[in-house]
Image (cartoon, rainbow, N blue to C red):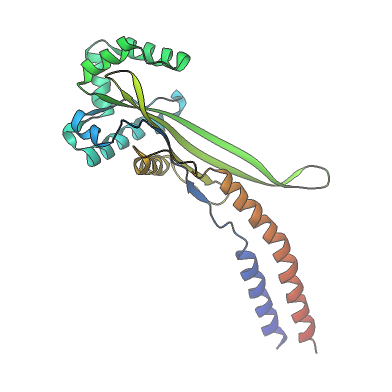
Amino acid sequence: MLHTVRNHSLVLILVGLSACAPTITSLDTSCPQFKDVRFSSDQLTTQRIAILPVQGVQSKEQYRTPLGRSLSQSCISNFGQSSVLTSDEVAKLLSENNLVGTYANGLRDYRTTGILATEYVKSMAEATGCRFALYTNILPEQDNVVIASNQYGTATNKVSIVELSAEVQIWDLQNGGIVWEGKGGYAYNSNREQINSEQLTENVNKGLMNVLGREKSDNCPNRNLLVQAEQMAHARTLFGFVGVTGLASFIIFLSGY
């Protein structure tokens, strides 16, 4: 009888503690942030779009090239083969037309001034034969957040949130305007699960394509939700451990009679 009760108590402890895992451990953080009222994604089918080589730190090449190719294929699926110039094709055209320097200088000036120079966008339109261009800049990030500390201020529980974001704009090469802006993103709690670079890149691509061309949203999820989920799980663990182990001890005590 005592052995049986103890087994039941152990089951109660395990069930109680397993219920304290975070409710979410990964999250699509994609978000449409701006859309020109005169722009419609239908225009991408009729007037063509060039997928520019993805920008970002060179040390993250495992994200840049795969994301550019994934975006290219997704755009082909959405808008048609004849409406899309892939990132690889754009890179080849820039090289063949001796525009690599012009392209790099134009990007540098845009980042500094926030203005797309007329000569720059005109050269891009002529080289690609497209009215629109998809500009993408990746931002790999990692937050290490303290969930709990002891009385001496030493962290006793930390969570690491990893996110890959792609800041995206659609440029109108006809007039140098930004007609759409948004973010493709995916975040996960690396304490709870692991996602390789290929899967992470594909998740960002899927999230971005779900919001591309849509109206601005003010209710987009962000990675702080993963931190909050971990904080709630930690709190439930503390209270759950006390409650469940107390109950188990009481049952074991009764089994002695």
Q: Nearer the viewer, residue 5 or 163?
A: 163
51 relative to 108, above or below: below
Across and down, in percent, residue 16 comes to: 64, 69
Q: Quadrant of residue 35?
A: top left
Q: Quadrant of residue 155?
A: top right
Across and down, in percent, residue 175 comes to: 30, 18
Across and down, in percent, residue 36 comes to: 36, 30
Residue drawn at point x = 42 percent, y = 12 percent = 109
104 relative to 253, above or below: above
Q: Quadrant of residue 257?
A: bottom right
Total number of numbered discs in the rendering: 0
Residue drawn at point x = 43 percent, y = 39 percent = 197
Residue drawn at point x = 79 percent, y = 48 percent = 150
Q: Residue furthest front?
A: 37
Q: Nearer the viewer, residue 162 or 174?
A: 174
Across and down, in percent, residue 57 comes to: 46, 24
Q: Residue furthest right?
A: 151
Q: Nearer the viewer, residue 173 or 225?
A: 173
Image-based side of 135 in relation to 193, left or right? left
252 relative to 34, above or below: below
Residue drawn at point x = 23 percent, y = 41 percent = 77
Quadrant housing the N terminus:
bottom right
Image-based side of 78 in relation to 208, left or right? left
